[in-house]
Image (cartoon, rainbow, N blue to C red):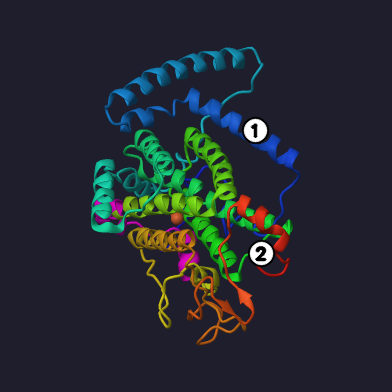
């Protein structure tokens, strides 16, 4: 039986909440969010959410120092908040009762989720093994250095909290696809360059896919703590602009960075699956996962796959949480393949340019009709170039074709 456990922070649920509704103005949204998150921050301090972190952190010197500073800050803020509340400057803070009202079945699932583990050192060993086998990613030191720093921060902050770690990763992992779509629109609006159909479809399908990964982590309680939401959402906005700037200068550098991150996701999920197989097999799949992997309209799911041979279709199982994580890991493998193809300018269009896919049904039985860069029926499919090369070539370009 699929379930939505209700462990999440209260953000909207795909397929369940506000289906098709439109947002109010930015001012109303920003004010509403600030009020809500300010109250959440106060609760996190007053009811010390941070003790959950201290019980899971690895006993290395950096974590110990962070804990000493963190607990001093928490106790000072608690005193200040109580003082302001006592004088009526701030409203009364009340503890959430959502977790107290869980059914016994839900409580059991929550206990199992809290027992899930991930050994960072084994993830690193997996990564080294992959590189030794020749499946590493060649990247300039600046990109590789940024990637290593990102992994190191995650290892420190999310030791022994795999679901929260995955939620942060998925929040950030969507950003490159937003950034690529934004840049393709920008280049087209300026009349500098127009992307081929396949590139647009792939990036949109990837963003949709990552959104579902994120929703799955939310149903498992990944965004429950205020500090995790604060960290992930700010990191995501920062990361979006980093990728935009990278793409401006060199799309292939941006794609290589994404390839590194996607490979890391594959290694992390593979290790997680190996360490937690039995526990995961005993937990029902979240509702959003079943809806995404098993519902009737799988057009965007199929559009995600760029490396299939003609006639093969991926239709994964989704009977328990183990299947769900296998599916996520396999999706990440598709992202690796796509980012590699984008970086190397070798992406393959699925569809015949006439608009008919082999075997009927757009995207259900992919047909590779030509490779990126080949001219077909007067349409040239090319990868985007960096900003400088596009500007330099602009006078010779036409609005409808490519440079
Ligand atoms: Fe993902
Ligand atoms: Fe991904």
* Occupied quadrant, residue 333: bottom left
Q: Name the residue under label 1.
A: 34
Q: Where is residue 181 in the image (x, y as percent from the top left)?
A: 61, 57
In the rendered structure, the answer to whether residue 254 lies left or right of residue 131 reads right
* Occupied quadrant, residue 151: top left
> Which residue is located at x 31 percent, y 39 percent?
160
Q: Where is residue 47 in the image (x, y as percent from the top left)?
A: 47, 26
> Which residue is located at x 69 percent, y 37 percent?
30
Does any portion of residue 221 appear in the rendered image?
A: no
**Quadrant location of the N terminus in the rendered image:** bottom left
Mark positioned earlier in the residue sequence (2 or 1): 1
Disc 1 secondary structure class: helix
Numbered label attached to residue 162: none
In the rendered structure, the answer to whether residue 45 lies left or right of residue 267 reads right
Disc 2 secondary structure class: loop
Q: Position of residue 337 (x, y in %)?
A: 41, 63
In magenta stretch: residue 161: no
Frontmost of labels 2 and 1 is 2
Vertical order, 365 against 131 (above or below): below
Vertical order, 110 against 40 (above or below): below
Q: Does the residue labelled 1 lie within 8 Å of ligand 1?
A: no
Q: Name the residue under label 2.
A: 194
Tell me where the magenta segment starts and ends, as one range: 271-294
In magenta stretch: residue 277: yes
């Amino acid at each position: 039986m699929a379930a939505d456990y209700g462990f999440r922070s209260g953000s909207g649920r795909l397929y369940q909440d506000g289906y098709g509704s439109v947002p109010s103005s930015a001012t109303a949204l920003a004010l509403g969010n600030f009020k809500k998150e300010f109250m959440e921050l106060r609760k996190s301090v007053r009811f010390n959410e941070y003790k959950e972190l201290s019980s899971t952190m690895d006993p290395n010197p950096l974590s110990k120092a962070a804990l000493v500073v963190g607990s001093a800050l928490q106790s000072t803020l608690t005193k200040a908040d109580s003082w302001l509340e006592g004088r009526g400057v701030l409203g009364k803070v009340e503890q959430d009762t959502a977790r107290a009202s869980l059914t016994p079945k839900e409580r059991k699932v929550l206990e199992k989720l809290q027992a899930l583990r991930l050994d960072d050192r084994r993830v690193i060993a997996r990564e080294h093994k992959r590189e030794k086998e020749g499946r590493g990613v060649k990247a300039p030191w600046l990109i590789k250095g940024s990637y290593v720093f990102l992994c190191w921060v995650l290892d420190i902050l999310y030791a022994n909290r795999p679901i929260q770690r995955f939620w942060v990763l998925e929040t950030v992992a969507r950003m490159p696809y937003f950034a690529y779509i934004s840049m393709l629109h920008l280049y087209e609006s300026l009349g500098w360059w127009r992307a081929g159909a396949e590139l647009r479809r792939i990036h949109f399908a990837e963003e949709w896919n990552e959104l579902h990964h994120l929703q799955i982590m939310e149903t498992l309680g990944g965004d429950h703590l205020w500090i995790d939401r604060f960290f992930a959402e700010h990191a995501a906005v920062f990361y979006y602009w980093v990728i935009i700037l990278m793409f401006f200068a060199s799309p292939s550098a941006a794609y290589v960075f994404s390839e590194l991150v996607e490979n890391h996701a594959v290694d992390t999920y593979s290790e997680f699956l190996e360490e937690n197989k039995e526990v995961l097999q005993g937990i029902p799949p979240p509702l959003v996962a079943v809806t995404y992997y098993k519902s009737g309209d799988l057009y965007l799911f199929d559009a995600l796959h760029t490396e299939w041979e003609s006639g093969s279709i991926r239709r994964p199982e989704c009977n328990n949480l183990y299947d769900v994580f296998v599916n996520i890991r396999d999706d990440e493998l598709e992202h690796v393949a796509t980012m590699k193809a984008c970086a190397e300018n070798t992406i393959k269009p699925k569809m015949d340019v006439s608009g008919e896919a082999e075997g009927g049904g757009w995207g259900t039985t992919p047909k590779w009709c030509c490779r990126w860069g080949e001219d077909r029926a007067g349409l040239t499919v090319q990868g985007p170039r960096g900003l400088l090369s596009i500007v330099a070539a602009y006078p010779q370009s036409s609005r409808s074709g490519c440079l």
